[in-house]
C-alpha cells in the first residue's frame, strides 16, 4: 500500500529554498489559508472561559460567548460553502461573525475579516503583501466605523501594532510571528488605559490594571496563526 506523504500535501503552497538549503514558505494557498483559520477559530472557541473572565472584570462578561458563537458559525460556513479564493475565506469568516454575534463586537470583529477583502482583487495565494493589505484595510474600516484609536482600550491597541509589524516585515512567517508579539505587547498596554468605549467606559479608573477583552482576542487570533504555521509548514 502506498503511504501518503502528509507533508507533501500540507506543503503544496509556494516553497523556496535559500542558499543555505533552508525551506522558505512565501505564501499559503487557499486550502492552507482555510485550514489555518479553522485552527484559529478552534483556538478562540477554546479561549471562551478566559475571554469571559477578562470581560467580566471590566464589561458584561459576554465577549468570550460572542467570539465563540461567531467562530463556530465561521467553521460551519468554511466547511460547507464553496471556497475558491483567499477572499472567500476572509469574507465567509467576517460575514459569519456579523450575522451570528450581533452587537458592536460582531461588527468590529466581522469587519476585521470582511473589511479587508471588500475591494481586493481575487487572490488564490496569501503572501505577506496580501495579508498586510487585507489587515491594513480592515483596520482602517474598523477605525472609520468604531471611531476608536490607539490608547482607547479597545482591540485597536493590539490590532494596529500587529498590522504595523506586518508592514515592517519582509517575510510572511516572521511577519505573522512578529505581529503576534506586538499584539501581546498591545494587550499589556491596555491595562494602563481607561476606556473610551463600551461598558468599560462607565467604570472609569476602576478598569485600570485590567486588559481589554477585544485586544486579547486579536492577540489570540495572531498567536493561533503562528501556532498553525509552526505545526504545519
Ligand atoms: P460588548 O461591548 O457589546 O459587550 P464584547 O464584549 O463582545 O461586546 O466586546 C467588547 C470589545 O469590543 C472591547 O473589549 C473592545 O476591544 C471592542 N470594542 C468596543 N468598542 C469598540 C470600538 N468602538 N472600536 C474598536 N473596538 C471596540
Ligand atoms: Mg461584553
Image (cartoon, helix red, strand yellow):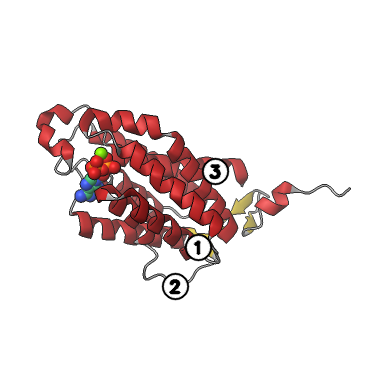
Q: Is the residue at mark 1 in contact range of ligand 1, meaning its CB lies under 8 Å from it?
A: no
Residue 33: x and y in percent read 53, 55
Query: How far across and how far down the image is residue 123, in percent?
Result: 50, 68
Relative placement, left or right, of 105 versus 173 is left
| N-terminal label among 3 and 1 | 1
Residue at the spot of label 2: 121
- In terms of secondary structure, where does tag 1 sit? helix
Q: CA distance from mark 2 to mark 1?
A: 10 Å
Label 3 crowd (10 A; few <14 / some 14-19 / many >=20): some
Query: Which of the numbered marks, if any, corresponds to residue 228?
Result: 3
Q: CA distance from mark 3 to mark 2?
A: 26 Å
How far, Cα to Cα, is label 3 from label 1? 17 Å
144 sits to left or right of 229: left
What percent of the width, then of the height, locates residue 93?
43, 55
Query: Which callout, 3 or 2, points at the residue further toward the start of the chain?
Result: 2
Secondary structure found at label 3: helix
Note whether 153 is above or below 123 in the view shown: above
Q: Nearer the viewer, residue 130 or 216?
A: 216
**Residue 108 placement (x, y as % from top left):** 29, 52
In this orientation, does residue 142 appear?
yes
The residue carrying pointer 2 sits among few (fewer than 14), some (14 to 19) or many (20 or more) residues within 10 Å by Cα, namely few
The residue where tag 1 is placed is 86
The reply to whether the C-beta atoms of the residues labelled 3 and 1 are less than 8 Å apart is: no
Amino acid at each position: 500500500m502506498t503511504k501518503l506523504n502528509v507533508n507533501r500535501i500540507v506543503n503544496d503552497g509556494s516553497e523556496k529554498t535559500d542558499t543555505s538549503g533552508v525551506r522558505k514558505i512565501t505564501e499559503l494557498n487557499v486550502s492552507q489559508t482555510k485550514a489555518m483559520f479553522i485552527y484559529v477559530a478552534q483556538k478562540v472557541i477554546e479561549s471562551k472561559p478566559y475571554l469571559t473572565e477578562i470581560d467580566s472584570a471590566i464589561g458584561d462578561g459576554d465577549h468570550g460567548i460572542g467570539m465563540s458563537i461567531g467562530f463556530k458559525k465561521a467553521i460551519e460556513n468554511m466547511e460547507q460553502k464553496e471556497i475558491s479564493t483567499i477572499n472567500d475565506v476572509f469574507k465567509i469568516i467576517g460575514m459569519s461573525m456579523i450575522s451570528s454575534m450581533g452587537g458592536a463586537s460582531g461588527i468590529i470583529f466581522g469587519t476585521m475579516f470582511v473589511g479587508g477583502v471588500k475591494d481586493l482583487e481575487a487572490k488564490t495565494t496569501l503572501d505577506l503583501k496580501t495579508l498586510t493589505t487585507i489587515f491594513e484595510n480592515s483596520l482602517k474600516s474598523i477605525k472609520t466605523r468604531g471611531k476608536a484609536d490607539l490608547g482607547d482600550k479597545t482591540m485597536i491597541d493590539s490590532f494596529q501594532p500587529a498590522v504595523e509589524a506586518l508592514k515592517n516585515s519582509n517575510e510572511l512567517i516572521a511577519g505573522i510571528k512578529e505581529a503576534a508579539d506586538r499584539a501581546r505587547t498591545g494587550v499589556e498596554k491596555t491595562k494602563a488605559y481607561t476606556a473610551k468605549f463600551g461598558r468599560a467606559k462607565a467604570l472609569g479608573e476602576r478598569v485600570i490594571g485590567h486588559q481589554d477583552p477585544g485586544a486579547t482576542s486579536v492577540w489570540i487570533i495572531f498567536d493561533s496563526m503562528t501556532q498553525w504555521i509552526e505545526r504545519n509548514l
